[in-house]
C-alpha cells in the first residue's frame, strides 16, 4: 500500500520501520515539530523524524494538523491509507475520511481499556497481568473507533514500563502489517467498542513518582516498575531525592526472614523509633520500644512520643507518633526503615514492606542498595519522606 504515516516517539518509529520492512511505500511522514530540550533549549527532532530523514522520506511537521492549509498539504501526497501511531494530535474528519481505507491507529492497550495517553505504563501501575496492542479504525473521539485486530502480551512480575514499551512497539509493528494485509484482502470486520467498558488514562507527571508510603507495598512496587525509566519513583532521604529503580514487595514476616541470616553483610531487624517489630524487638502483639505493639502503637494508637507534632496524625499520631503518613500494619511508621543490609533497605508501608534493591541518591550514580550502604549508613527508624524538609 501507499501510506501516509503519522507518529512521533520511538514507539511510532518502530511501527514505521515495520511498514518499511514489509514493503509498503511511505509517501509522507507527519510528526510533531522539533522540541526544545536541555538548558540551552536546543531543538531536538522526534524519533520518527530522525528515522524518516535517514530513509529519505518527506517530512511534514505542522503545529496544528487541523488547519485548512495543512489538510490541503496532505492531499498533495498520494496514499491508500493513513497509519497513525502515537502522533499527539486529534485528527479532524477531513483527514479521517481523506484516503480509500481511512485512518488506522496503532494503540498500545487492549481497547476499550486505557484510552488516552500512557496506556503502557498505566497497565503496570494498576497491576495488570495482561495488556497488548489494538489496531483501530479511527473515529472523531479519543481512541473510540472500531476495533480491527488485537494482540495480547503478558506482563511479568518484574516488567518495567520501559521494557513493556519496547515489547509492545515490536508487537504493534507486526500487528499493523498483518492488519493492512487483512484490510486489503477484505478479511477485517470492524467491531464497535463497548463504551461501558472503556477507561481513560492521562499523561504521566513527575510528581506521580513521589511514593506515598501509607499505600500497600505491592502497589508501591507497581509504581516503581511502571514509572521506570520516567519519571521514576522516588522519596527523600536526609533532604536529598532518592530514586528507587527496583524493589520487592514483602509481608512483614518475609522481610524479617530476609534479614535473619548470619551471612556476612546481612542485617537483622531491630526496634525502630515507633517500636518496629522484629527479630531483636517485640512480637507482633507484644510491647515495643515504648511498651506499645501492634495493638498499642499501631494503626490507631500513638508512637514513641505519644501524640504527634500537632497532637494527632492520620491514624491517631502525627510526625513524632506514627510518622508522616500514619502507621504501618506492624506498629512502625509508614516510610520508616526497618532494616538495611545485604538484602536491601526494608521500608514499612501501609500494608507490608517494600524492599529497596536498586536506588540512586541525588547527585550519585545508580547502584544496588548493598553498594549504597557501603558508603551510607542508614539506621532503623530513619524515615523516607515525601518532602525535602
Image (cartoon, helix red, strand yellow):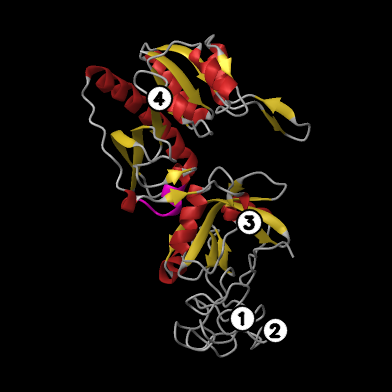
**Mark 4 closeness class: few <14, some 14–19, many ≥20 residues within 10 Å:** some
Which residue shows up at 41% across the image and 37% down it? 108
Mark 4–mark 3 Cα distance, whole angstroms, equals 60 Å
Residue 347 tag number: none
Q: Position of residue 245 (x, y in %)?
A: 55, 49
Residue contact at pointers 1 and 2, CB within 8 angstroms: yes
Label 2: how many residues lie within 10 Å, few (<14), some (14-19) or many (20+)?
A: few
Instruction: Please say whether residue 276 is one of the residues in the magenta stretch.
Output: no
Instruction: Read off the residue under disc 1.
Output: 313
Q: Is residue 188 left or right of residue 371?
A: left
Name the residue that disc number 2 marks.
Answer: 310
- Residue 98 occupies quadrant: top left
Q: Which mark is residue 97?
A: 4
Residue 300 visible from this viewpoint: yes
The stretch in magenta equals 122-128
Q: Which numbered mark, 2 or 3, is in the foreground of this view?
A: 2
Q: Secondary structure at mark 2?
A: loop
Question: Could you tell me which quadrant the N terminus lies in?
Answer: top left
Helix, strand or loop at mark 1: loop
Checking the image for residue 373, the label placed there is 3
Most foreground residue, 202 or 314 = 202
Residue 243, image x and y in percent? Answer: 62, 51
Q: Report, in whole angstroms, how far the alpha carbon at label 1 lies from the one at label 3.
A: 31 Å
The tag earlier along the polypeptide, 4 or 3, is: 4
As drawn, the residue found furthest toward the left would be 187
Of the residues under marks 2 and 3, which one precedes in the sequence? 2
- Residue drawn where x is 72% and y is 47% of the image: 363
C-alpha distance separating marks 4 and 2:
63 Å
Question: Given contact means CB atoms under 8 Å apart, are the residues at marks 4 and 2 in contact?
Answer: no
Q: Residues within 10 Å of mark 1 (few under 14, many from 20)?
A: many
At 43% from the left and 63% from the top, the residue drawn is: 250
Amino acid at each position: 500500500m501507499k501510506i501516509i504515516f503519522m507518529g512521533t516517539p520511538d514507539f511510532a518509529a518502530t511501527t514505521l520501520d515495520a511498514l518499511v520492512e514489509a514493503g509498503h511505500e511511505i509517501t509522507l511522514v507527519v510528526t510533531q515539530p522539533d522540541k526544545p530540550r536541555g538548558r540551552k533549549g536546543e531543538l531536538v527532532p522526534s524519533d520518527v523524524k530522525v528515522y524518516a530523514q535517514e530513509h529519505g522520506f518527506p517530512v511534514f511537521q505542522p503545529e496544528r494538523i487541523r488547519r485548512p492549509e495543512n489538510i490541503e498539504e496532505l492531499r498533495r501526497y498520494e496514499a491508500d491509507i493513513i497509519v497513525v501511531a502515537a502522533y499527539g494530535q486529534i485528527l479532524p474528519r477531513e483527514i479521517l475520511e481523506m484516503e480509500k481505507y481511512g485512518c488506522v491507529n496503532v494503540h498500545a492497550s487492549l481497547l476499550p481499556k486505557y484510552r488516552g495517553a500512557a496506556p503502557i505504563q498505566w497497565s503496570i501501575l494498576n497491576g495488570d497481568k495482561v495488556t497488548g496492542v489494538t489496531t483501530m479504525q479511527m473515529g472523531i473521539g479519543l481512541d473510540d473507533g472500531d476495533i480491527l485486530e488485537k494482540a495480547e502480551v503478558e506482563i511479568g512480575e518484574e516488567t518495567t514500563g520501559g521494557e513493556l514499551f519496547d515489547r509492545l512497539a515490536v508487537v504493534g509493528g507486526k500487528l499493523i502489517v498483518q492488519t493492512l494485509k487483512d484490510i486489503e484482502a477484505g478479511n477485517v470486520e470492524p467491531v464497535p467498542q463497548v463504551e461501558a467498558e472503556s477507561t481513560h488514562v492521562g499523561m504521566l507527571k513527575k510528581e506521580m513518582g513521589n511514593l506515598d508510603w501509607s499505600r500497600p507495598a505491592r502497589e508501591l512496587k507497581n509504581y516503581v516498575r511502571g514509572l521506570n525509566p520516567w519519571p521514576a519513583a522516588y522519596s527523600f532521604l536526609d533532604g536529598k531525592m532518592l530514586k528507587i529503580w527496583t524493589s520487592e514487595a514483602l509481608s512483614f514476616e518475609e522481610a524479617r526472614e530476609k534479614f535473619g541470616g548470619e551471612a556476612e553483610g546481612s542485617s537483622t531487624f531491630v526496634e525502630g523509633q515507633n517500636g518496629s517489630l522484629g527479630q531483636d524487638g517485640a512480637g507482633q502483639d507484644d510491647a515495643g520500644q515504648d511498651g506499645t505493639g501492634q495493638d498499642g502503637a499501631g494503626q490507631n494508637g500513638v508512637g514513641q512520643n505519644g501524640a504527634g507534632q500537632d497532637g494527632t496524625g492520620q491514624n491517631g499520631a502525627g510526625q513524632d507518633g506514627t510518622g508522616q503518613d500514619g502507621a504501618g500494619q506492624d506498629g512502625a511508621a509508614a516510610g520508616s526503615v526497618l532494616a538495611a543490609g545485604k538484602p536491601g533497605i526494608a521500608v514499612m508501608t501501609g500494608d507490608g514492606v517494600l524492599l529497596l534493591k536498586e536506588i540512586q541518591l541525588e547527585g550519585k550514580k545508580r547502584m544496588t542498595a548493598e553498594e549504597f550502604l557501603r558508603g551510607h549508613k542508614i539506621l532503623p527508624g530513619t524515615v523516607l519522606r515525601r518532602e525535602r524538609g
